[in-house]
Image (cartoon, rainbow, N blue to C red):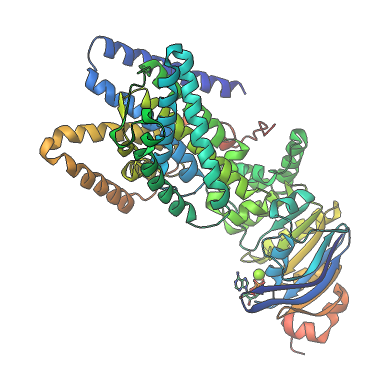
């Protein structure tokens, strides 16, 4: 579904990505793990066309999407739940969700999506009139995911959905991600919380200083000594 | 749905009652011709200021040349009316349309190169545009003598009556409200709050900014057209930098992203300007500038979100705000 080939990104003279390649197949959850500053966010932002790559290619369903505008990418079916949520604080929860459906015109189906989101996140329904800026961190994360789902994406990019959440809520969010995936949405998940990410993903890539240093089956990586030492907080 | 209709109806009925009251007060002389002028001016300011409210208040694009667009509207509409004035109401409506289209078109021409840039380039560009328009109008008589150049233009038929001004302002308020609470309006708010977030939900941010800018400039042009038909004499100085600043003050004071704030402040502003003329007397009338700069500074210190802080009168707020999905999407 998504193929990233030899992708390079520079910020001025600093090279954030050194020609990384990976792919996500239809129906999968693939996770990209790595330490702070490894280039995870940069990778997702480049897929969403928020950063310009200096080299390489991104294919979505076989079509090159490099160089497209961000709004085109969304209407092609890629939704991005960004690091830090980026919900619109001065709009209500409902308005934020409706913004998620911005690229869609099928009124009746938008209504269905809305009901699905409310089913998944009953908390959002209770608070639909509240200004999104006044939601708690966890609720904002739910809203960010709900908003992305309102676009009815084929591929969901998630950037550290567990950030700043209590363990229970992390658990809940990861369960929700699994369900979303089971209901047919392909997921590319970026996480610091490698433990949780490897639990739900089928495959994983390890990013270090802009390079992919390891990849494979989640289970294999969970067993890998180096990964255990570096990302799962265990001594080797 | 029923509630929605009722609210709109209520607002229209309220407006008609207000109109009748004003009409009666003018007829029996409670509002003398002088204050009637001020009232007219406040209605014109509402139209222009709502334009800037869309550009700056709702979309976050800083424009320092709003009065220039008002001026373009005033001159083009005025000139049109002078030329085709014999057709009365029809030519008046035509003139207003000409003013709107002309100002909107200029907004388009400036917006296309400038709005692609993030940050404050629009402020600089529109500031420059304001100067250009002033110089152009000062010298316009060399090309078209009837425009009067620096001496100003006279002879536009004075067709803007209370009815016209009042109901045009009302229509503009309703249109603006519908725009702001539409999908497009929410896209504008998203762009203002966080352009990246807007990008991420699939908003074409450039197009959104451009659309908002053109819409705002068109309203400026409409305000200008009304202005030209309300005042027998207009001159380039009426639409210079300080006037742009006036519009900015109205929008900021009222609260960015509050239509209610813009409307109320526009009225308050027009009356304050004139009120101060009386309070200060002819000798000190120039101190008005100091006083409103002070008001602005104090507002920013005490209440940065403006008088209305993004809030709206209930009757201006449709369903989505209240937590119901509006299925009234784009079509
Ligand atoms: N706009 C930018 N300008 C300059 N440097 C940037 C920019 N964005 C990212 N970088 C740099 O690129 C590198 C990768 O950053 P990125 O945000 O992708 O890391 P990350 O893996 O998401 O880290 P974290 O887990 O802390 O979020 C970092 O060194 C960062 O400083
Ligand atoms: Mg990151």
Q: Which of A98/A162 is in front?
A: A98
Q: Which of A85/B84 is in front?
A: B84
Q: Residue at x 34, y 45 (%)?
A: B241
Q: Give x and y (percent) for residue B331.
A: 70, 31
The quadrant of the rendered image in which ligand 2 is seen is bottom right
Instruction: Left or right? Give the position of B57 relative to B24.
Output: right
Q: Residue at x 29, y 51 (%)?
A: B297
Q: Give x and y (percent) for residue A193.
A: 71, 72
Q: Give x and y (percent) for residue B239.
A: 35, 38
Q: Is residue B293 above or below residue B26?
A: below
Q: Is residue A22 above or below residue B231?
A: below
Res A133 visible:
no
Q: Which of A33/B70 is in front?
A: B70
Res A209 visible:
yes
Looking at the image, the residue that sits furthest to the front is: B142
Instruction: Left or right? Give the position of B141 relative to B210.
Output: left
Q: Quadrant of residue B3?
A: top right
Q: Quadrant of residue B146?
A: top left
Looking at the image, the residue that sits furthest to the bottom is: A236
Instruction: Left or right? Give the position of B206 relative to B220.
Output: right
- Marks counted in the figure total 0
Quadrant showing the N terminus of chain B: top right
Instruction: Left or right? Give the position of B188 relative to B143.
Output: right
Q: Give x and y (percent) for residue A121.
A: 69, 49
Q: Residue at x 60, y 20 (%)?
A: B2
């Amino acid at each position: 579904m998504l193929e990233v080939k030899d992708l390079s990104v520079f910020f001025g003279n600093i090279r954030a990505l050194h020609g990384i390649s990976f792919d996500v197949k239809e129906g999968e959850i693939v996770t990209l793990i790595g330490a702070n500053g490894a280039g995870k966010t940069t990778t997702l932002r480049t897929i969403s066309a928020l950063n310009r790559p200096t080299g390489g290619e991104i294919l979505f369903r076989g079509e090159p999407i490099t160089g497209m505008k961000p709004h085109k990418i969304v209407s092609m079916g890629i939704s991005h739940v960004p690091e830090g949520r980026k919900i619109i604080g001065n709009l209500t929860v409902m308005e934020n969700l409706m913004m998620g459906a911005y690229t869609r015109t099928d009124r009746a189906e938008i209504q269905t999506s809305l009901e699905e989101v409310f089913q998944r996140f009953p908390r959002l329904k209770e608070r639909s009139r509240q200004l999104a800026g006044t939601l708690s961190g966890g609720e904002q994360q739910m809203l960010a995911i709900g908003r992305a789902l309102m676009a009815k994406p084929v591929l969901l990019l998630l950037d550290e959905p567990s950030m700043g959440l209590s363990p229970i809520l992390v658990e809940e969010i990861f369960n929700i991600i699994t369900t979303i995936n089971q209901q047919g949405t392909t997921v590319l998940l970026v996480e610091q919380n490698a433990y949780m990410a490897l639990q739900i993903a089928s495959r994983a890539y390890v990013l270090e200083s802009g390079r992919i240093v390891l990849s494979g089956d989640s289970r294999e990586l969970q067993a890998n000594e180096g990964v255990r030492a570096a990302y799962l907080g265990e001594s080797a | 749905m029923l509630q929605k209709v009722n609210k709109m109806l209520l607002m229209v009925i309220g407006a008609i009652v207000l109109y009748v009251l004003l009409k009666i007060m003018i007829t029996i002389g409670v509002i003398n011709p002088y204050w009637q002028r001020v009232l007219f001016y406040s209605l014109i300011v509402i139209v222009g200021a709502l334009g800037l409210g869309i550009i700056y208040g709702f979309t976050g694009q800083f424009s320092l040349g709003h009065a220039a667009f008002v001026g373009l509207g005033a001159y083009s509409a005025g000139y049109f009316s002078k030329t085709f004035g014999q057709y009365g109401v029809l030519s008046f409506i035509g003139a207003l349309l000409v003013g709107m289209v002309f100002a909107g078109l200029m907004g388009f021409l400036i917006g296309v190169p400038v709005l692609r840039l993030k940050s404050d380039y629009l402020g600089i560009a529109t500031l420059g545009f304001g100067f250009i328009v002033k110089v152009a109008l000062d010298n316009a008589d060399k090309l078209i003598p009837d425009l009067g150049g620096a001496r100003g233009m006279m002879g536009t038929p004075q067709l803007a009556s209370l009815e016209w001004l009042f109901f045009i302002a009302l229509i503009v308020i309703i249109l603006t409200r519908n725009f702001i609470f539409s999908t497009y309006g929410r896209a504008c708010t998203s762009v203002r709050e966080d352009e990246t977030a807007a990008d991420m939900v699939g908003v074409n941010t450039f197009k959104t900014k451009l659309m908002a800018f053109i819409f705002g400039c068109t309203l400026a042009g409409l305000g200008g057209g009304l202005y030209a038909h309300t005042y027998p004499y207009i001159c380039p100085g009426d639409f210079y930098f300080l006037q742009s600043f006036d519009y900015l003050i109205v929008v900021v004071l009222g609260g960015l992203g509050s239509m209610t704030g813009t409307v109320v402040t526009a009225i308050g502003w027009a009356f304050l300007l004139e009120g101060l003329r009386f309070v200060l007397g002819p000798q000190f009338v120039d101190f008005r500038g100091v006083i409103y700069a002070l008001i602005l500074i104090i507002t920013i210190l005490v209440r940065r979100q403006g008088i209305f802080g993004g809030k709206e009168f209930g009757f201006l707020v449709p369903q989505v705000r209240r937590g119901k999905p509006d299925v009234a999407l784009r079509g």
